[in-house]
Image (cartoon, rainbow, N blue to C red):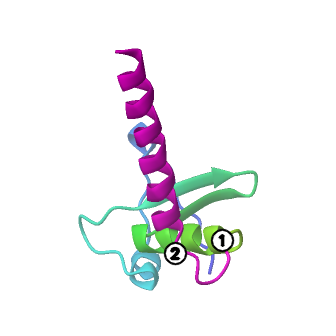
C-alpha cells in the first residue's frame, strides 16, 4: 500500500486514514519513527518493542533469564565496590 503525501508547514504531513487504521493508530497515540537508507518507517510503540525483543532473542539462548543475569552482575559489581570502599576506609 503506497500513497503520496505532501510535507506541509514545519515539516508536518498527514498520515492517511487507511494507514492509521491499518496500524491501529487513534487520535493522540504516539508513533515511533525510524529513518534508514531505505526511507522512513512509522510504527506503534508495541511494534517497536516486539521488533527489539525479536532482535535480542537472536543473541540470548532460549530459557535464559537475561534480566536476572544482568541484575546479578550489577549486584556483584555493587558488592565489589562496597568491599573496595570499606577496605580504603
The foreground one among 75 and 43 is 75
The foreground one among 13 and 49 is 49
Q: Nearer the viewer, mark 1 or mark 2?
A: 1
Q: Which residue is drawn at 40% across and 76% down?
A: 20
> Which disc, if any, is residue 50?
2
Q: Position of residue 47 (x, y in %)?
A: 49, 74
Q: Where is residue 2 in the image (x, y as percent from the top left)?
A: 63, 75
Residue corresponding to mark 1: 60
The foreground one among 6 and 74 is 74
Q: Does the magenta stretch include residue 83?
A: yes
Of the 4 image quadrants, the one containing the C terminus is: top left
Give the dominant element type of the magenta stretch: helix, strand or loop.
helix
Q: Quarter of the image holding residue 46?
A: bottom left
Residues rendered magenta in the picture: 60-89
The foreground one among 29 and 56 is 56
- Which of marks 2 and 1 precedes in the sequence? 2
Q: Position of residue 65 (x, y in %)?
A: 52, 73
Q: Is mark 1 on a helix, strand or loop?
A: loop
Q: Where is residue 14 in the image (x, y as percent from the top left)?
A: 41, 61
Amino acid at each position: 500500500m503506497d500513497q503520496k503525501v505532501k510535507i506541509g508547514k514545519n515539516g508536518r504531513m498527514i498520515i492517511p486514514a487507511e494507514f492509521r487504521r491499518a496500524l491501529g493508530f487513534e487520535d493522540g497515540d504516539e508513533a515511533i519513527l525510524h529513518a534508514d537508507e531505505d526511507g522512513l518507517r512509522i510504527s506503534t510503540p508495541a511494534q517497536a518493542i516486539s521488533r527489539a525483543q525479536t532482535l535480542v532473542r537472536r543473541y540470548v539462548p532460549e530459557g535464559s533469564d537475561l534480566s536476572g543475569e544482568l541484575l546479578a552482575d550489577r549486584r556483584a559489581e555493587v558488592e565489589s565496590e562496597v568491599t573496595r570502599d570499606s577496605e580504603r576506609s
